[in-house]
Amino acid sequence: AQSVSQHNHHVILSEAASLELGCNYSYGGTVNLFWYVQYPGQHLQLLLKYFSGDPLVKGIKGFEAEFIKSKFSFNLRKPSVQWSDTAEYFCAVNSNTGGFKTIFGAGTRLFVKA
Amino acid sequence: GAVVSQHPSWVICKSGTSVKIECRSLDFQATTMFWYRQFPKQSLMLMATSNEGSKATYEQGVEKDKFLINHASLTLSTLTVTSAHPEDSSFYICSARAGWGDNTEAFFGQGTRLTVV
């Protein structure tokens, strides 16, 4: 079955710390990978996406993610977090074998201490 | 970028009544639309997929008679929560996808918060 797994449910960091959020997927076929952010009380915003090409993807707000096909992973990184990065982060995947239904991971709630 | 708009943004209704939520793709034609629900502090759960002009495909465990989905045109899909009850209170989010290619992105609406009292 198609699934998306996010390893960390809650992460607490101090400002300027580095961030890495794990995401693994279980899918067949050609996959498209996404990271979304949801700030408290707001709707989803797309941080970055991977369709093909360079497996290192740069997104908005200084975030990047690396697609490692052999590990079925798409981890999100940021070298130095800010208090304003406090939010929930969702990894999402769709695939041509799944009718391009976008399936979300459980989410990781990040709290950045000022 | 492409814009998907939901209406209303929030709605309160009495238990037993029905509520309709609209999802529109404003600047593109959506061949496929998806409906999700998100409970507080939880992830988005896919409810159903609808293609224009055909019946929606519901995910396992989602009652098709309770959550009526209509995708009458390439820019509009509606979700009607029939005989709503307090446990249906949730955040409902739609997304719309244009085209059929492998690299076609889905764009998300801002969501509709439904409260059933």
Image: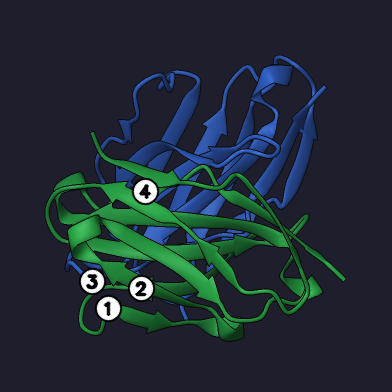
Chain colours: A green, B blue
| Kind of residue at badge 1 | Pro
Which of A57/B55 is in front?
Answer: A57
- For the question of whether residue A108 can be seen, the reply is yes
Residue at (52, 55) in percent of width and height? A90
> Which chain does the residue under circle 3 lie in?
B
Residue position for label 1? A55
Camera-side residue of B59 and B44: B44
**Which disc number belongs to residue B72?**
4
- Residue under label 2: A66
Residue depth check, mark 1 versus mark 4: number of the one nearer the observer: 1
* Residues flagged by tags 1 and 4 on a common chain: no
* Relative image position of residue B37 (x, y in whole percent): 55, 38
Q: Amino acid at mark 2?
A: Glu
Disc 2/disc 1 C-alpha distance (Å): 5 Å
Give the spatial CA distance, label 3 vs label 2.
Answer: 18 Å
Cα separation, mark 4 vs mark 2, equals 39 Å
Residue in front for this viewpoint, A96 or B49: A96
Task: From the top left corner, tell me how far across and down residue A44 is, in percent.
Answer: 60, 61
Q: Quadrant of residue A57?
A: bottom left
Callouts 2 and 1 close, C-beta under 8 Å: yes
Q: Which residue is mark 3?
A: B103
- Could you tell me which chain the residue with mark 1 belongs to? A
Label 1: element kind: loop
SS for callout 4: strand
Which badge, 3 or 4, is on the more N-terminal residue?
Answer: 4
Give the amino acid type for the residue marked by disc 4 in the picture: Ala
What's the chain of the residue with tag 4?
B
Residue B72: % across, % down: 36, 48
**Front of the two marks 3 and 4:** 3
Q: Chain of mark 2?
A: A
Three-letter code, disc 3: Asn
